[in-house]
Every structure is written in C-alpha cells, then in structure tokens.
Image: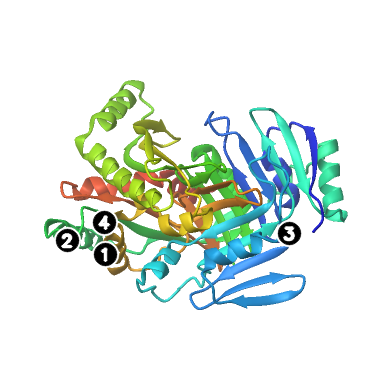
Amino acid sequence: MNKQHKISYDYYGDTRDIFAVIKDSEWSVFLCSNHDKFQDERYDILSANPVEKIISYIDKTTVENKNGIQEYKDDPIDVVGIVMKKYPSDISDLPFTGGAIGYLSYDLGNHYEGIEIKKNDLNVPLMAFGIYDWAVIVDHHKKNTTLVYRNEDSFIENIKLCLEKKIFDKNQEKKFLINSACESNITHDEYESKFNKIQSYIQSGDCYQINFSQRFSAQYSGDTWDIYNKITPAYSSPYSAYINMPFINIMSFSPERFLSYDGNIVETKPIKGTRPVSADIQINKQLIEELSTSYKERAENLMIVDLLRNDLGKNCEFGSVKVKELFSIETFANVHHLVSTIQGKIASNSNIYKLIKDCFPGGSITGAPKIRAMQIISELEPDNRNIYCGSIGYISFSGTTDLNIAIRTIIATKDKLYFWGGGGIVYDSEIESEYKETFDKIKPLLDLLKNPT
C-alpha cells in the first residue's frame, strides 16, 4: 500500500468552485459545512474517482475495484469495515484522510429489523459507499486547504494545479428545468386517515410517537449541481452533501447530525421541535419563545433523547453516555429547531461500524419505541423512504466519522426528483398543525420547483 501524502495550499473560501472542477467525474462527492452560517462547523470535503465501490441490495453486497467485482454475503456495514482495513492512515490532524463516503438508506434499517421492504420503485441500492484514496479538505477556521492522496496520476496533477493556481471554471453550470407539477404520494384526506390511525396506535399503547412523512416528486431535466447551488442560499445547513453516482444524484441540506466520532467521543444531535422563521423580528422572537417553552415539543425531544441514550449505551463505556445539551434552539434558513446533544465514549470491545448498526436509523426520524414505530411507518407510508431519513457522510481511514440524518434531501433518478417532508406525531398533536409542518420544512424546495429560474 502506497504511503499517504499531504500538501497544504492557500485558503480558498468557496469550496463549490473547487468541486465544480471534478463534479462530472465518477462518483464525485462534496460534503459542505456552510461554515459562514454555522460557526461550530469548519470543514468541507470533496473527492471523486474512488478506488473501490461498495453497493448493497437486499440479497448481496458487491465491491468493485481494479481487480474486478467481488460479492459478499456479510452485513453491508461490516463489508465497509472489511474493505477499509486495507487502507492504513498515518495522518492524524485532519478529520478525513481518505476513506468511505456515501449513504445508508433508511430501508437498510428495515432490513436489519426484519421489516418488509416494499418493492423498490426507484431501484436505489440500500447502501452505496466509495472508498476514496484522495481528498481535498478545506478548514474554514484555520483558513487552509489540504490535499491528501496516495497515488500520483494525471488526475491528481490537475487537482494540484487547480489548487496552486486557483484555476477554477465558474461558468460551466448547466441549467435545470422542472417539467411537471410537483405531486405528493398522499392526499390531504389520506394524510388525515393515516394520522387518525397513528392516534389509535398511540392511545392503545403501541407507541408514544411516530415520525410520519409524505413523498413529493416532479419531472426534471438538466444539471442537479445547478439545483444544489440554487437551493443552498435558502436552505443552508451544516451537514449538506452533493453526491453524484451513476444510479442516483443526492442533494442533501440536512440540519441534523446522526453520529460523529473523533476517535474518542461519539456524538449525536437529535432534532425534535420546529417553528417557522418569520421575517418579522417580533413575531420571530415569539416563535422562538413558543418553541423553547412548549411542553409538547420538549416532551417529544426528551423522548428521543432517552431513546438515543439507550442506542449509544449499547456500544459505549458504562456511565459515559451524557446529555451535553438539552433543548437548545438552533435557527436555520426557514425553521427554528429544538436540538439536544448526547455524547459517549465507545467501549474497547466495540467499534464505529457496530455503533452505526446498533443506532441506525436515527431515533429522531422513527419515533418511540423505535422498532414498533418503524413497523407502523412501513404499514402507513405508501412507498419506501429510500435515502430519506437514512444517513450521508464519511468514515475516514483514520477512524473519524461524521454522518447526517438525510432529511431535507432530494434524490434525482430517471429524470425525476424525489423529496420528503415529515414530522413527529404524539397523542396531543393536531392534524392541521402537523400537516403544515411537513410543508414548512420543505418550503425552499417547493418554492424553487415552482420558479427554478
């Protein structure tokens, strides 16, 4: 295995310009922190042309590399771990030193729990990760840009030239068009019927909370990178991603962290509780106060905090799982959210892959108790969630990890865009309020699709 190399370059703030150079390359990936809006976030990561490609369907996982395609019957996440062992890293001062970047679909969680996965109408893999032996990492706090790589070739030489000379083509975007009306997979009457069914489950003691969603779709043509760039200003979020795979393009504007791991501490930051952002300063203050003092929202959030403490506890040292922050208000472009932070220390007999499996999917997008909530979601939602409410992010060769919850996420496949809006339903939820919340969360997407110019 070739030694890793690391080269530092002058800081370049708009990482999208760098990514535009490689966006049409095979399996190009871009993880964006939107640091200018979220001061605690600092790194952007981009890469392309993975040395290995891991793709999972229900019955098999394949790994493709220069030697051909190998089929595995092992657990999909375990396969990622098996492949990653081939790539040691001696770089410790970067969050990503090369490694796995990709997604876990929500439906993989159903697979783990033995819950029926409906016919895959989009034919999207349950999981897909590229193994990248090079990457550009931009640190917006230290104001520097770093290239890590193993093998020197013409592609890497071109990246070096671009970073050294700051030669970026800023005028290569191809516009996109929306070619049909945006449609939901359920009507208002159907939503009401399913809402009432959830209430009956809650009242009978089956569950305490169900995260229920509807799926929207529209025909499109053109460049999904243009979609990503047009939505970003109105939908800035700290765990954004653009992933370009042959079978799917993913544009994620997620505000929520599923799991991060720095080699010592693991962290999850569930969101539960939402209010819209108002342009009126006084009304906005009232909305924030209303959210921060809402008994209903705090109860929902606490329910998920308890669930995630239990999930982390399966793989963390006894007594190490702590709630670092409870009921913090975080403001995004179009909504205020109630966010809590839970941390723990991974036990010596566990690892990041086992932790991901035991926590997946995130409890904030299922409900409680988790498995029963997932069963009810499968019963009532007419289509698979696919990548929605799954997870997107990276696992570095060095072990560090950062994965989002794939909400506020668009997928593009077969000339069609799909995206979802949802929310948590509890015993005292009101149907019109919950229905409206699903639209509040995706308003920038709907606005763009109505007027894409």
Foreground residue among 423 and 403: 403
Q: Which residue is mark 3?
A: 49
Quadrant in the rendering for residue 378: bottom left
Colouring of the image: rainbow
- At label 4, the amino acid type is Pro
Instruction: Calculate the distance from the C-alpha at mark 2 to the C-alpha at mark 3.
Output: 48 Å
Mark 4 or mark 1: name the one nearer the start of the chain.
4
Foreground residue among 143 and 443: 143
Q: Is residue 415 visible?
A: no
Quadrant in the rendering for residue 92: top right
Write the residue at 31% across / 28% down. Answer: 288
Instruction: Calculate the distance from the C-alpha at mark 2 to the C-alpha at mark 4.
Output: 12 Å
In contact (CB < 8 Å): disc 1 and disc 3: no
Q: Which residue is mark 1?
A: 376
Instruction: Calculate the distance from the C-alpha at mark 2 to the C-alpha at mark 1.
Output: 9 Å
Label 2 residue SS: helix
Foreground residue among 301 and 94: 94
Instruction: Calculate the distance from the C-alpha at mark 1 to the C-alpha at mark 3.
Output: 40 Å
Q: Which residue is mark 4?
A: 369
Q: Which residue is mark 2?
A: 201
- At label 2, the amino acid type is Tyr
In percent of width and height, residue 252 lies at: 52, 50
Which image quadrant: the N terminus? Answer: bottom right
Instruction: Calculate the distance from the C-alpha at mark 4 to the C-alpha at mark 1.
Output: 11 Å
Label 3 residue SS: loop
Mark 2 or mark 3: name the one nearer the start of the chain.
3
